[in-house]
Amino acid sequence: MYLGELISLVVAFSWTATALFSEVASKRMGSLPLNVIRMVLSLALLALTLWITLGSPYPIMADSETWLWLSLSGLVGYALGDWCLFQSYILMGSRFGQLFMTLASPSAALTAWLLLGESMQPLAIAGMIITLLGISMSVLNRGGGDGRRKLSLKLPPQGILLGIGAGMCQGIGLVLSKVGMEHYESAIAMQGIGDLSQWSSEGALIPLPLSYMMPFASTMIRAVTGLVGFTIALFAFSHNGKSRLQAAISNRKGMYCALGAAIFGPFVGVSLSLMATLYTHAGIAQTIMSLTPVLIILPSWLLFRQKVTVWEVVGACICVFGVSLFFI
């Protein structure tokens, strides 16, 4: 009973751990070297998982259209979105960075409306407004010491813009992933497989139904694009990319945190989030998994001694409530 809800809560804690590991690693390595290393580690874990469960370390039966759409998703969601997110960690910390990730749901709704023609329900529009209100409460100062009630930003404007970019890219990437997985299902059907839940590989060590593993294969395609994008950015658009990567690899604490970010993020987080939807409604699972901006407040205070105000806590809770309206 409530297994799906419990798994969703574990996912929220897992993504909280990812954010904390990523903040430490970003500040020690820089966002680009960290993301190159994180993508390599993620691909290794995903390849091992696919080999054990499907008998192949790479996505099987994925056609060119599948690769196209999922690669676009990886370019937007991983290469651009994660770069913005990890840069925001450096400027304003993981607590506020995760707060802006609540913009993923409004961004996904808008993108689905534009690309797929999905309707925008009144509750979804209300959810957008409430989410923006919660973010505003958390990032604005209510007044100065001179008694005037002027609003001012408590965070660097560049960090806010990066946070907004990260949330928007996450939402857009999710919609592109949905399109890509629809093409993936069609490509598999062209191979004569009608029911994905009944097909499994006889050559796998632990055979699992293709319906369970297709999202992992899709994630691997996205991660490949993410790795290519981050590698190009590191070596072509940044100074001394090779020396930066070597310095990052030699940073022992940074590597431990990068490994933690890879395990709890793309690997454990994604795996359990998919599992949660098997045992409860997707909307309930997504709402519980969106608790990360609230869950991260206490460890941020304990580990990084970040000052937390009641106003910020209320704002984070309002953001989670706003996200929940998208799934009612």
Image (cartoon, rainbow, N blue to C red):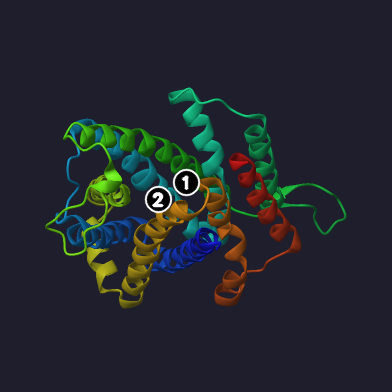
Query: In the drawing, does residue 143 fall left or right of residue 131?
Result: right
Say which of 9 and 135 sits in front.
9
Quadrant assignment, res 308 = bottom right
Say which of 322 and 187 sits in front.
187
Quadrant assignment, res 55 = bottom left
Tell me the kind of residue under disc 1: Ala
**Above or below for 31 versus 191:** below
Say which of 144 and 316 sits in front.
316
Residue 91 drawn at (x, y percent): 51, 57
Q: Going by the picture, which residue comes out furthest to the right?
A: 147
Q: Where is mark 2, residue-wise?
A: 82
Tell me the kind of residue under disc 2: Asp
**Above or below for 220 versus 8:** above
Q: Where is mark 1, residue-wise?
A: 166
Residue 15 drawn at (x, y percent): 47, 61
Mark 2 packing: few (<14 Cα in 10 Å), some, or many (20+)? many
Say which of 32 and 303 sits in front.
303
Residue at 19% in and 32% down: 64
**Above or below for 13 versus 150:** below
Is residue 56 in sight in this rendering? yes
